[in-house]
Image (cartoon, grey):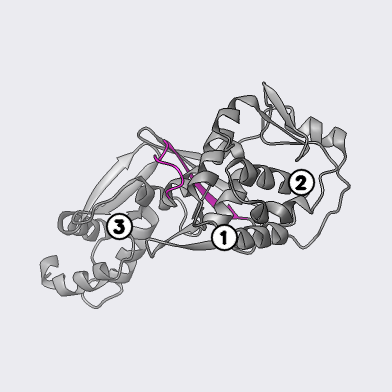
Amino acid sequence: MRDLGYYNKLFDFYISNIIYNVLNKKELNEVISEIKSNHGLKSRPKDEIEIFLINAFFRKEIKDDFFLYSFRDRKIDILDISSTASRTAFFSYQTALYIHELSDKLTLNVYLNKERAESKTSTFSILGQDALDAAFNKEPRMSKNQKKYGQYHITLLSGQFHNGLGIIDFRKNYLVSDLERTLIDCVVRPFYSGGAEVILKAFKNAKGRLDVTKLFKYFSEMNFIYPYHQVLGFYLEKAGYAFEDYKTFCEFGNELKFYLDYNIQNKAYSSEWNLYYPKEIEEFFER
């Protein structure tokens, strides 16, 4: 039986076609299955090929909830590692803020969002003030679908179906919400986004890059039940955008009192947007 080194060119071919810097256990097994399909290797034990691949190409790491194989000659980071949890999910919320340079640091919480399948049934409900108050004057429900890697917590979310609206490529092989979709998502789920202060600063940092026409278009297509246009308009105004940039959100109306965040302890009120917000963010308003 030939030494596996005899098949170096074959191994190199398969390895060169791997697009990710880090593989999970299932992905490595798929590569091994493809290699074993070749003449001369069909009878070789899977474990033998795995050991050869580790010695020649990969670093094997078992850490907390992750079983990984990373290329020895490639630099990897927590985003590479997190993506092994789902190749079809996109980086979102506060992680996407960091990717778009709207926040200055990557937090220890990494967020991936995978849209649910399109629902065949549609529900229509009339939103009342009592129901809205009840929903926002308590702590939000947060996903427990987390994986741990060292000090990091990777949360895999199951988001509402929006047909991939505003989802773009990142590092060629990953996905991320674009700038406009990211800001909308953060407005809708502030508890995954660092809270009101972080989001307000993100709107400020987006000046000169944010396409407000696209922002409004996305918002209109996402068909929210809650009046998030009041929050978007508020952030645009307080971040110092021109009235022309947020007037379309004004035109939606604001019949219901709404909330910038959940369970706000020290409320202030904007009569212009009919919106409660945390008073402590006032120091960050553009005057």
Position of the C terminus by quadrant: top right
Q: Is residue 132 visible?
A: yes
The span from disc 1 to disc 2 (Cα, nearest Å) is 21 Å
Look at mark 3 in the image and give the residue it sits on: 21
Residue type for callout 3: Asn
The answer to which of 101 and 95 lies nearer the viewer is 101
For the record, the magenta segment spans 101-115
- Quarter where residue 172 is shown: bottom left
Q: Which residue is mark 2?
A: 227
Q: Nearer the viewer, residue 226 or 279?
A: 279
Secondary element under disc 1, as helix, strand or loop, is loop
Q: Residue at x 52, y 58 (%)?
A: 178
Callout in the foreground (1, 2): 1
Q: Amino acid at mark 1?
A: Asp
For residue 47, above or below residue 230: below
Using the image as rendered, state which of residue 200 and residue 94 is in the foreground.
200
**Element on which disc 2 rests:** loop
- How far separated are the C-alphas under marks 3 and 1? 32 Å
The image shows residue 238 at horizontal and vertical percentages of 62, 40
Give residue 115's quadrant in the image. bottom right
Tell me the residue that label 1 is attached to.
211
Residue most extreme to the top: 266
Horizontal placement of 199 versus 175: left or right? right
213 relative to 248 in the view: left or right: left
Reply above or below: 47 against 275. Answer: below
Label located before the other in sequence (1 or 2): 1
Residue at image location 41% in from the left, 35% down from the top? 108
Is residue 193 at least partly visible in the picture?
A: no
